[in-house]
């Protein structure tokens, strides 16, 4: 490969260099002309005018079941992402929850039915994988578009052990969770994740989290969607750091944000807490996505107690007048009572847009717009949509300010994660699924100059590789796997928006995995060349 400006992933300044790849690995990185092309039997790649850097590592992905889809999930590879950290926010496809196949081996007395515990996150329909070994067997048979680095979800472990119960884990419950975690670690997961705004993770306490995170071998990561990213942002950071100290593990704050109007402007305080903890020996890092809107399931707008018993129980509550009055009072209260109120954080129903539904109705409209069309209050419209669609509804919530995003993005320990909901649901997903990495390079490097190019690439490559112990990736260096991306820094961007998100990025010339070009000028070569990786 010749003619390129190499940004090697370490943060070092860009330099002109030629790169030799043999059998999928980089064997030389030399000044221009040092590698004699005429004596090489390998095909030459002309990268004149382009920046070549390591393939990007998505530090926060939900593409857990993408390998099982009939169509290839190109949402990340077209961005230059060659490796994804999946299993975030406490959700993983294994181990199976209670009710799967009519029985839960970890908790056979659990009363929930399969309907009550169906996992709405993953597009493959919530098939029960009783163990990570079983899951990985199924995934390996299908192959991977990008490299796959899985975390085990705390919520999935808890659901398998206890069902959707709002209760403190007993020693017996915890023993089951720890047994399931050991199986996952033996199978090759990269760490543990939690989602503490989502049931059943919301029902857990610090002791439970520390007990499970304490099982992690040195170098594997506890990644957490914290308990509150709005009113109680700082106390949630304190909880996160306390769990890490108790467990003695590396910790990743997922999608660090001031995720509501009550927290706007507090990012410098949040970053200072992380910096102080790092100075005191806590191995803490975080990821950020470059958008002012978040995205999750619409049912997350309801208080955690409403979810106890699973989706079936929640639907029954939404159809019970007395229970519905309680839920409305909680959602529309001036201050939430110990839970993160996403409606309040977004400043009301007008800032929450339905992005996808099971029937593809209502998509692209805000809750107040839906209410106006239906002739009802926005809360009632939200409930009607949830009931009609059997809870299979995702949302985009406009709840952040750009100045906080930039503070988080430039802080020590910050890396980039898309946090895109799984590909394959259709509708209008958050554009971060298709454009996170080009948007950072276009808006925050070229246009706003928030980051220097070399620093931005470091946060997308070597930093997540080192944090998550990703083997052989993250650097343009001799011995590294030749997962590479070539881009034009003058044009790299993503033109998608919230109504038309599934748009190809611009400025990504080609993407290479293990020495083979898999994307060229936006065109997919058609062969899955990713691998499920094992922690280094």
Image (spheres, helix red, strand yellow):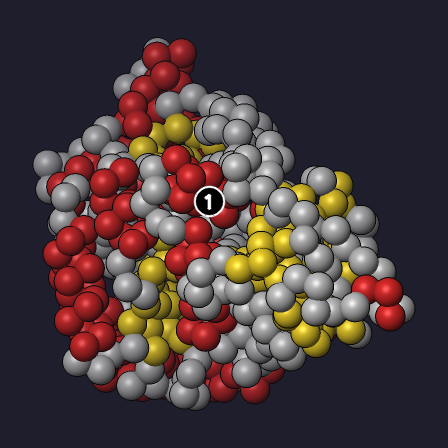
Going by the image, does 480 lie left or right of 174?
right
In this view, the residue farthest toward the left is: 334
Q: How many marks?
A: 1
x%, y% of residue 40?
85, 69
x%, y% of residue 457?
47, 57
| Whether residue 248 is situated above or below residue 131 in the rendered picture | below
| Whether residue 188 is situated above or below residue 444 in the rendered picture | below
For the question of whether residue 78 can be seen, the reply is no
Residue receiving disc 1: 441
Badge 1 density bin: few <14, some 14–19, many ≥20, Cα 10 Å = many
**Which residue is at the front of the view, 465 or 395?**
465
Q: Quadrant of residue 367?
A: top left
Q: Quadrant of residue 456?
A: bottom left
x%, y% of residue 523?
75, 41
Residue at 27% across / 38% down in the picture? 402
Going by the image, does 197 lie left or right of 104?
left
């Amino acid at each position: 490969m010749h003619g390129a400006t190499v940004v090697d992933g370490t943060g070092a300044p860009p330099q002109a260099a030629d790169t030799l790849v043999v059998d999928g690995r980089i064997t030389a990185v030399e000044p221009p002309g040092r590698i004699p092309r005429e004596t090489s039997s390998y095909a030459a790649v002309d990268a004149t005018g382009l920046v070549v850097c390591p393939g990007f590592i998505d530090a926060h992905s939900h593409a857990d079941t993408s390998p099982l889809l009939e169509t290839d999930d190109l949402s990340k590879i077209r961005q230059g992402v060659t490796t994804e950290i999946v299993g975030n926010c406490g959700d993983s496809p294994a181990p199976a929850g209670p009710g799967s196949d009519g029985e839960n081996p970890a908790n056979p007395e659990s009363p929930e039915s399969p309907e009550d515990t169906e996992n709405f996150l993953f597009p493959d329909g919530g098939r029960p994988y009783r163990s990570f070994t079983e899951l990985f067997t199924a995934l390996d048979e299908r192959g991977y578009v990008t490299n796959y680095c899985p975390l085990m979800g705390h919520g999935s472990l808890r659901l398998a052990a206890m069902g959707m119960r709002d209760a403190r884990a007993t020693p017996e419950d915890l023993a089951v969770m720890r047994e399931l975690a050991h199986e996952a670690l033996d199978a090759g997961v990269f760490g543990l994740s939690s989602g503490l705004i989502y049931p059943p993770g919301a029902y857990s306490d610090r002791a439970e989290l520390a007990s499970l995170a304490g099982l992690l071998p040195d170098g594997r990561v506890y990644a957490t969607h914290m308990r509150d990213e709005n009113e109680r942002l700082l106390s949630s950071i304190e909880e996160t750091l306390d769990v890490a100290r108790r467990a003695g593990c590396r910790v990743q704050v997922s999608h660090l944000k001031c995720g509501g109007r009550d927290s706007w402007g507090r990012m410098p305080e949040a970053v200072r807490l992380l910096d102080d903890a790092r100075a005191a020996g806590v191995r803490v890092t975080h990821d950020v996505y470059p958008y002012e809107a978040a995205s999750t399931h619409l049912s997350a707008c309801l208080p955690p107690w409403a979810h106890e018993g699973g989706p079936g129980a929640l639907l029954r509550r939404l159809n019970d007048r007395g229970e519905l009055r309680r839920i409305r009072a909680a959602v529309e209260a001036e201050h939430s009572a110990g839970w993160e109120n996403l409606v309040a954080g977004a400043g009301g129903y007008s800032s929450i847009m339905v992005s996808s539904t099971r029937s593809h109705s209502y998509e692209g409209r805000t809750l107040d717009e839906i209410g106006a069309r239906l002739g009802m209050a926005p809360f009632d419209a939200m409930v009607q949509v949830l009931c009609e669609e059997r809870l299979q509804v995702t949302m985009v919530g406009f709840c952040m300010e750009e100045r906080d995003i930039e503070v988080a993005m430039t802080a020590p320990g910050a890396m980039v994660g898309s946090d895109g909901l799984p590909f394959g649901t259709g509708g209008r997903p958050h554009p971060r699924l298709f454009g996170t990495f080009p948007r950072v390079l276009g808006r925050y490097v070229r246009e706003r100059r928030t980051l220097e190019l070399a620093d931005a690439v470091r946060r997308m490559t070597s930093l997540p590789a080192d944090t998550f112990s990703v083997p052989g990736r993250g650097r343009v260096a001799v011995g590294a796997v030749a997962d590479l991306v070539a881009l034009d820094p003058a044009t790299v961007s993503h033109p998608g928006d919230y109504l038309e998100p599934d748009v190809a990025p611009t400025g990504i010339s080609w993407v290479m995995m293990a020495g083979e070009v898999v994307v060229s000028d936006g065109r997919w070569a058609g062969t899955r060349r990713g691998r499920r990786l094992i922690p280094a």
